[in-house]
Image (cartoon, rainbow, N blue to C red):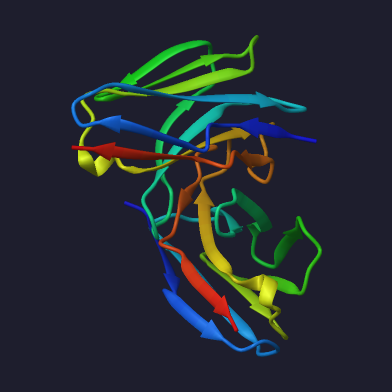
Amino acid sequence: SQTIHQWPATLVQPVGSPLSLECTVEGTSNPNLYWYRQAAGRGLQLLFYSVGIGQISSEVPQNLSASRPQDRQFILSSKKLLLSDSGFYLCAWELGADQETQYFGPGTRLLVL
Amino acid sequence: GQNIDQPTEMTATEGAIVQINCTYQTSGFNGLFWYQQHAGEAPTFLSYNVLDGLEEKGRFSSFLSRSKGYSYLLLKELQMKDSASYLCAVILDNYGQNFVFGPGTRLSVLP
């Protein structure tokens, strides 16, 4: 069966510091991968998606970036965090090929102070 | 733009039935999903409707009317553990990046 991991689970970072969040998927090959952010009291906002190694598409221009160095690894990064980057970051995977259901990882709660 | 509406909060009693509504106005439609999200946790998949009608899965059922842009999630025999947010999401086409989430409905189940 497929599992998805995210780490760290929680993170407190000062404004202006860098960020690296990691997501890995097990039990599947060539999944579509997604990064979402859920701010307090708001819906999920799609940040990035990837259909393959090295293929990243951005949905919202901001100070975040994403990379997919391996088939089942998706990384969310920032060079300088802003206060507004605080939120719950969720990685999701999907089989693709019309298997549209997205399955979420446990999430990373980021607080920028 | 894409718009998905859900009630912000609902309260129900243990053992009762509750219906959570979702209306959508989107530029495309290729299916509607319901997710359950407990506080501090990730959303978990509950149901997927692409054709009109009712899909039943144990205590949970989901209904879709494409002509009305309307769906509901029906929870029967409510349990305390059903207290969570319920997210309605529409996928606009065959591409997963066009997956739009509603704001979620926070359900509180009282004893």
Front residue of A63 and B11: B11
Q: Position of residue A73 (x, y in %)?
A: 53, 69
Q: Position of residue B67 (x, y in %)?
A: 65, 9
Q: Residue B95's quadrant in the figure?
A: top right
Q: Is residue B4 above or below residue B66?
A: below
Q: Is residue A91 left or right of residue B76?
A: right
Q: Is residue A71 visible?
A: no
Q: Is residue A41 left or right of residue A7?
A: right
Q: Is residue A70 above or below residue A100?
A: below
Q: Residue at x 28, y 21 (%)?
A: B17
Quarter holding the C terminus of chain A? bottom right
Q: Residue at x 55, y 53 (%)?
A: A41
Q: Is residue B36 above or below residue B56?
A: below
Q: Residue at x 64, y 32 (%)?
A: B4
- Marker count (numbered): 0
Q: Is residue B62 above or below residue A30?
A: above
Q: Is residue B11 left or right of residue A105?
A: left
Q: Residue at x 21, y 41 (%)?
A: B80
Q: Position of residue B65 (x, y in %)?
A: 56, 12
Q: Residue A49's quadrant in the figure?
A: bottom right
Q: Residue A112's quadrant in the figure?
A: bottom right
